[in-house]
C-alpha cells in the first residue's frame, strides 16, 4: 500500500463506560493501516503520574521497572490483547534501551508501534474509556494524537452498567446519571479546547443508524482513506463481556431504556442529567426537575452502601 503523508499519530477511543467504545474499537482495528489492541491499556495515566519514581530512563534497569509496573497494572492486556508481539520484559528492556526510549511516552509509543508493525500496520490506537477524563494529558504525551469521543444515550448506558454493577459501582439511576454526565461533559469541554483536528465527538446511535456515513466521517477526521473493512469488520472470536461483537452492527441496540427502565428510574436519571441529555440531542421523557438535596443525599448513600456491601460480601443484594 502506498504511504500517505497524513498524520500517523495515535488514535484514542474514549467515552463513558458502556457507550459502544468496544464496538468502535473492533471496527477501527479492521482498517488496513490502524492497529487497535482488543483490550484496554489503563496504564498510560498512572505511569505518567509516577514517572519520577523510575529515575533516569536512559538506564536499562529503570526501563525494566517501567515495564514491570506496566505489567502489574494491565497483565491481561499485555498478555492477550497485543496481536502483533509478545510482551517479554527482558527482551523489551534491552530493545527500548538500545533505541534510547528514555521517557514514559517514548516507551509507551515504542511498544504500541512494535505491536502495530507486527500486525503489518503503520498507525496505533488504544481504547480505554476513562482516558476521556485525561485528554489534555494524552495530548501532552502524544502531541499528534487524535481522540474520538463516543457518546451514547446515558439511559442506555445506565441499563448496561446496572447489569454489571459491581464492575462500575453503579446501583441506582441517580449515580448512573452523574457518572455518565461527568464523562460526557468533561470530554466535550476539553474537546473544545483541543480543536477539530485533535478531537471528534460522535454519537453511538449514529453508527447504528448509518454505519457507512459514520465511518466516512471518522476516516475524514483521521485523514485516512475509507475502507470497506470498516463495514464488514472482523468480529470477536469469543463472546466475552460483549457478545454483540460476534455479530454485525445491531441497528436496534438503542432506546432500550424506554421499555427496560421503570418510570421512576427514568425520572431520577433525567432529573440528574436531563440538561446533558438534551444538549446532546436526546429526547426527555419526563419533565423532572432537580431532586431536593435530602433525596440526592439518600441516593448517594444508597450507592455507597451497595458498593461497600458488594465489596465485603461479594454478591449483590436482591
Image (tube, helix red, strand yellow):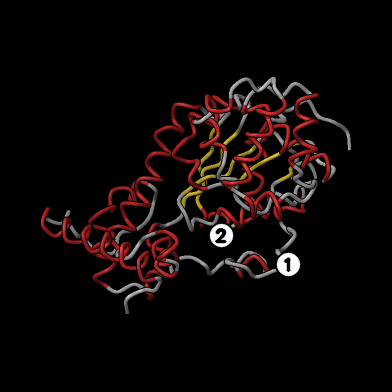
Depth check: give the residue in front, 22 or 115.
Answer: 115
Mark 2, secondary structure of its residue: helix
Task: Kindly identify which numbered label has been placed on residue 237.
Answer: 1
Quarter holding residue 285: bottom left
Tell me which residue sits at (63%, 53%) in the image: 39
| Residue 270, placed above or below residue 263 | above
Name the quarter where the N terminus is drawn.
top right
Task: Kindly identify which numbered label has been placed on residue 56.
Answer: none
| Residue placed under numbered mark 2 in the picture | 209
The location of residue 168, given as percent across then percent down, is: 42, 59
Q: Is residue 192 left or right of residue 104?
A: left
The residue at the far right in this view is: 1
Tell me which residue sits at (77%, 38%) in the image: 90
Indicate which disc, 2 or 1, sits on the residue closer to the N terminus: 2
Quarter holding residue 207: bottom right
The location of residue 63, given as percent across then percent down, is: 68, 29
Tell me which residue sits at (51%, 37%) in the image: 46
Tell me which residue sits at (52%, 36%) in the image: 45
Amino acid at each position: 500500500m502506498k504511504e500517505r503523508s497524513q498524520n500517523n499519530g495515535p488514535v484514542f477511543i474514549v467515552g463513558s463506560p458502556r457507550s459502544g467504545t468496544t464496538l468502535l474499537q473492533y471496527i477501527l482495528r479492521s482498517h488496513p493501516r490502524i492497529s487497535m489492541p482488543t483490550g484496554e491499556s489503563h496504564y498510560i495515566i498512572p505511569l505518567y503520574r509516577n514517572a519520577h519514581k523510575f529515575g533516569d530512563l536512559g538506564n536499562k534497569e529503570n526501563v525494566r521497572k517501567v515495564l514491570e509496573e506496566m505489567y502489574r497494572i494491565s497483565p491481561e492486556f499485555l498478555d492477550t490483547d497485543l496481536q502483533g508481539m509478545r510482551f517479554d520484559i527482558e527482551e523489551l528492556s534491552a530493545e527500548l534501551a538500545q533505541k534510547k526510549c528514555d521517557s514514559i511516552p517514548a516507551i509507551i509509543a515504542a511498544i504500541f508501534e512494535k505491536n502495530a508493525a507486527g500486525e503489518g500496520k503503520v498507525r496505533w490506537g488504544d481504547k480505554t474509556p476513562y482516558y476521556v477524563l485525561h485528554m489534555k494529558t494524552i495530548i501532552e504525551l502524544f502531541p499528534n494524537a487524535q481522540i474520538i469521543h463516543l457518546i451514547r444515550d446515558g439511559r442506555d448506558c445506565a441499563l448496561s452498567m446496572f447489569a454489571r454493577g459491581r464492575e462500575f459501582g453503579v446501583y441506582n439511576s441517580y449515580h448512573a446519571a452523574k457518572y455518565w454526565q461527568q464523562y460526557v461533559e468533561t470530554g466535550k469541554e476539553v474537546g473544545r479546547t483541543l480543536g477539530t483536528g485533535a478531537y471528534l465527538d460522535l454519537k453511538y446511535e449514529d453508527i447504528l443508524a448509518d454505519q457507512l456515513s459514520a465511518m466516512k466521517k471518522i476516516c475524514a477526521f483521521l485523514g485516512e482513506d475509507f475502507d470497506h473493512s470498516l463495514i464488514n469488520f472482523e468480529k470477536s472470536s469469543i463472546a466475552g463481556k460483549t457478545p454483540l461483537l460476534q455479530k454485525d452492527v445491531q441497528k436496534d441496540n438503542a432506546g432500550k431504556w424506554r421499555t427496560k427502565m421503570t418510570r421512576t428510574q427514568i425520572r431520577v436519571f433525567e432529573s440528574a442529567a436531563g440538561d446533558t441529555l438534551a444538549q446532546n440531542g436526546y429526547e426527555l421523557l419526563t419533565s423532572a426537575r432537580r431532586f431536593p438535596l435530602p433525596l440526592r443525599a439518600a441516593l448517594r448513600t444508597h450507592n455507597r452502601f451497595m458498593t461497600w456491601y458488594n465489596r465485603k460480601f461479594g454478591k449483590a443484594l436482591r
